[in-house]
Image: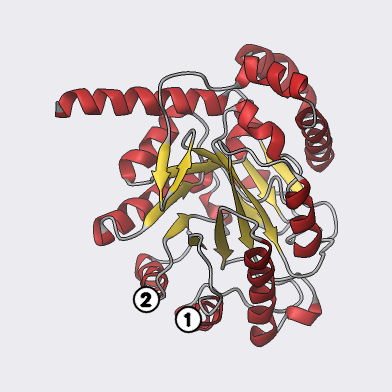
Amino acid sequence: MRLLYQFVLKPLLFRLDPEWVHNVFVSVGETFGRYAITRRLVSVVYGYRGRDASVTINGITFRTPVVLAAGFDYNGRLIRILRSVGFGGVEIGSVTARPSAGNPPPRLARMVRSRSLLVNKGLRNDGVKRIIQRLLETPPDPDFIVGVSIARTNDEQSASVEAGIDDYRVSLERLVTAGVGDFYTVNISCPNVHGGESFASPPLLRRLLASLCEVERRRPMYAKMPIDLPDEEFDELVAVVVEFGLEGVVIGNLHKDYDALEFREEVPAEYRGGISGRPCFQRSNQLIRRTREKLGDRLTIIGCGGVLSPQDALEKFRAGADLVQLVTGMIFEGPHLMKGIAHAYAQQRDMTSRRED
């Protein structure tokens, strides 16, 4: 199946508009997820059935250590099919208080030689109210974890700092009240194209978390971190996360430094946005390792950025990640990747356990 994807399906798909392909795959995945027979057929090919690869963090058990990162299933339409392709969980969103059409198209571009995507969606989503309704209507699966990433609506109404904080808080309050989401992630580094700043500075992050932490919740909350800050500034943000008692961090978000690309000429002149995939890999790993060395087990760390093979995932685990998230790897390598990561993780854990015995 890997060869079929790499040499037949992928070359065809990569000739087509990437956002159109994304929309088609979400529609197909949603349809397949509705029926037991199609879920079973997909699972026969791509599902993980090996040795125990589960991970328990903050009281939540993921059947496999691979989570679909926010930005792919931003409206919560794929929950019923994702377990069948080896995922242990998904992060829906980012979700905002009001619906957002996102940035004008084009919003997505492939940079094939750089093994990266240029993403400029602008927090496109149906809004927290509709997404909560959809998730409540989805039959629960006790073996699959659903997290929700929150951000502020990409419109003029939420462009100021105060309105932006209120926007985040509305989403969190509605999710908590509805009992939706096994965990929450605060996306702090997506700028608002209507003029709002991101919250990736200690003073603004402190104001945001002070408000969000007034909301009573029983489920863990993480902060999704930028990766393009100097080490010292990144450390200051992590210190704020610790100060307010969040359970962990996702390291990290899209890279905004185009010079991180190996083939800088692949960037289309008319695009803006962040870059995913391979250009994020080393910087993400450096920050994971730095955070783990400084804080030990005080924070859960979810590694995200450039996971395009089982070996990439293992490198993130060795750096200190508890889980990995991915999107670009699935697109470039195919839906067999998640099962491969789970196999590699279980094998590595067994080897480590035998050495310790």
Q: Secondary structure at mark 2?
A: helix
- Marks 1/2: CA–CA distance: 9 Å
Circle number at residue 95:
none
Q: In this rendering, would 170 be left or right of 299?
A: right
Q: Nearer the viewer, residue 118 or 284?
A: 284
Q: Secondary structure at mark 1?
A: helix
Circle number at residue 206:
1
Q: Nearer the viewer, residue 293 or 349?
A: 349
Q: Determine whether label 1 and label 2 are within 8 Å by CB.
A: yes
Q: Which residue is mark 2?
A: 243
Q: Is residue 81 above or below residue 166?
A: above
Q: Nearer the viewer, residue 350 or 151?
A: 350
Q: Amino acid at mark 2?
A: Glu
Q: In this rendering, would 203 be left or right of 21?
A: left
Residue 43 at x, y percent in the picture: 64, 20
Kindly identify the residue that appears in the image at 42 percent across and 29 percent down: 53
Residue 165 at x, y percent in the picture: 63, 80
Determine if residue 2 is in view: yes
Determine if residue 125 is in view: no
Kindly identify the residue that appears in the image at 64 percent across and 75 percent down: 169
Q: Quadrant of residue 317?
A: top left
Q: Label 2 neighbourhood size at 10 Å, few (<14), some (14-19), many (20+)?
A: few
